[in-house]
Amino acid sequence: MKLAAAAYPLDFLNSWAMFEAKLSRWVEDAAGQGADLLVFPEYGAMELASLGGAEVAGDLEAALHEVMRHEADVIALYARLAAQHGVHILGASGPAMAGAARPVNRAVLYGPQGVIGHQDKQIMTRFEREEWDIAPGQGLTLFDTALGRIGIIICYDSEFPLLARALVEAGAEILLVPSATEALSGYTRVKVGAMARALENQCVAVHAPTVGPAEWCPAVDANTGAAAIYGPPDLGFPPTGVLAETTLNAPGWAIAEISREDIARVRREGAVLNHQHWDEQKTRLELQVRTITHA
């Protein structure tokens, strides 16, 4: 199958039709290159805040509610595009109410037959906690699809290995990593996290970031990143672990062809067997940690 990760710029939208046309072009472009699974970034939905005007888009709280106002239309558009092109799509994440007092950060997965399900971000960054008041999601979901078993770890979640490991132990072969990072340091943290999760779990990680400026919305005013698809640097995969990568901060798709059998083979026959040997850590941790003091 072919996987596609979007390095996605946020635009100030003058109308819903402008968003519909933009998203349609992006999906058509990736599908036209043979992509079977398209991954859009974290908080890519925040460009919809501009539909409320500059004042709304420039207010952290008002922007959330403006984006949520379009939720039903967004779901219908992604579902229609997935059906039209016969692809799976992880839609750009955005705020959603989940029965709590505050919004969560939610990414919805679509297939050719419609909505498959959603994943909410689990661990909030300092900005999300201290300034934006975004609530954490309640648990992880494994998606068993026609393309394979898929897990989603949104941005900061990718920096915590036990989240990805829980999905892998449930059967995940592909991890989707949508992100939105302001600085090069933040992008690097998510990149290193995604690559590490691919290495230690001997799986594929698909990293899709927002890119470029969006000064009109303080929640996503600066965006640094490059889209990429990573695998373990071992049997059947590139020695760097990088299957495809876009130029830093350049909009576009990173597209790579992968095989579920390649994932199974490297887990079975790789030069190292991180996936199998994970539990040996627990044995080692049962031994006491010794402290040696040397003056």
Image (tube, rainbow, N blue to C red):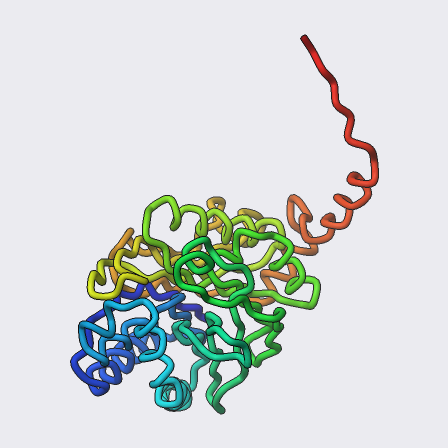
Q: Residue at x 29, y 79 (%)?
A: 23
Front-lying residue, 69 or 42: 69
Front-lying residue, 248 or 139: 139
Along the horizontal axis of the image, is 270 left or right of 116?
right
Front-lying residue, 174 or 70: 70
* Farthest-out residue, top: 295
Residue 129, percent from left and from top: 47, 59
Locate the C terminus and report the quarter of the image it occupies. Answer: top right
Q: Is residue 117 at least partly visible in the picture?
A: yes
Q: Residue at x 51, y 67 (%)?
A: 135
Q: Is residue 1 at least partly visible in the picture?
A: no
Above or below — where is 118 with respect to 232?
Answer: below
Above or below — where is 279 with respect to 144?
Answer: above
Residue 123, percent from left and from top: 54, 59
Dividing the picture into quadrants, the one containing residue 45 is bottom left
Along the horizontal axis of the image, is 276 left or right of 64?
right
Above or below — where is 220 with respect to 105?
Answer: above
Q: Residue at x 62, y 77 (%)?
A: 144
Dividing the picture into quadrants, the one containing residue 117 is bottom right
Q: Residue at x 49, y 56 (%)?
A: 156
Residue 276, percent from left and from top: 73, 52
Residue 26, percent from left and from top: 28, 75
Above or below — where is 214 with respect to 37?
Answer: above
Image label count: 0
Along the horizontal axis of the image, is 37 left or right of 59?
right
